[in-house]
């Protein structure tokens, strides 16, 4: 994509259209990656929702009748929380890597 501005008028109409389409595609991809690498909404509310079983667990653990249920709820809450954040962090890292590679090419 290293075409100088003075070279563009010398291109044929089809080449200019292809160059414009390639530039638009590159910019759309860049915008998508910039949005993907940013903050995600569930970062705020998901831990809050999943912390409720962790908050209630000590009250349920004291009752031997609910010990297994509370231990299971705590384990599942932690597992979901870790999996969710790991997935989102991996997506953000992938987007940052793609952006860095795209910046090297330009």
Image (spheres, helix red, strand yellow):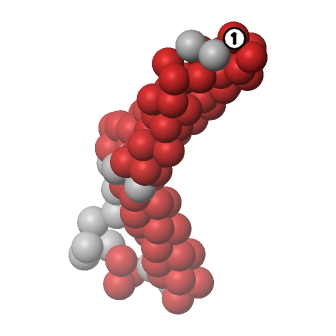
The furthest residue to the bottom? 13
Q: In the rendered image, is residue 102 in sight?
A: no
Rendered image quadrant of residue 18: bottom right
Q: Nearer the viewer, residue 69 or 11?
A: 69
Q: Residue at x 58, y 84 (%)?
A: 14
Q: Residue at x 63, y 16 (%)?
A: 63
Q: Residue tagged by mark 1?
A: 64
Q: Residue at x 34, y 63 (%)?
A: 3
Q: Is residue 105 left or right of 77 when viewed as pictured?
A: left
Q: Where residue 51 appears, x then y in whole percent?
A: 46, 34
Q: Nearer the viewer, residue 23 or 97?
A: 97
Rendered image quadrant of residue 47: top left
Q: Is residue 19 above or below residue 46?
A: below
Q: Is residue 52 above or below residue 79?
A: below
The secondary element bearing badge 1 is classed as: helix
Q: Is residue 90 above or below residue 43?
A: above
Rendered image quadrant of residue 81: top right
Q: Residue at x 25, y 75 (%)?
A: 6
Q: Where residue 43 appears, x then y in whole percent?
A: 41, 45
Q: How many marks?
A: 1
Q: In the rendered image, is residue 68 in sight?
A: yes
Q: Nearer the viewer, residue 97 or 77?
A: 77
Q: Where residue 100 appears, x then y in whole percent?
A: 35, 37
Q: Where residue 19 appears, x then y in whole percent?
A: 48, 72
Q: Nearer the viewer, residue 53 or 16?
A: 53
Which quadrant is the N terminus positioned in?
bottom left
Q: Is residue 27 left or right of 4 when viewed as pictured?
A: right
Q: Residues within 10 Å of mark 1 (few under 14, many from 20)?
A: few
């Amino acid at each position: 994509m290293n075409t100088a501005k003075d070279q563009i008028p010398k291109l044929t109409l089809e080449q200019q259209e292809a160059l414009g389409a390639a530039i638009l595609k590159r910019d759309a991809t860049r915008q998508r990656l910039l949005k993907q690498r940013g903050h995600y909404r569930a970062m705020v509310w998901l831990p809050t929702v999943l912390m409720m079983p962790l908050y209630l667990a000590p009250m349920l653990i004291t009752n031997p009748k609910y010990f297994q249920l509370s231990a299971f709820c705590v384990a599942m809450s932690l597992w979901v929380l870790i999996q969710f954040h790991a997935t989102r962090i991996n997506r953000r890292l992938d987007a940052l890597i793609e952006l860095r590679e795209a910046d090297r090419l330009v």
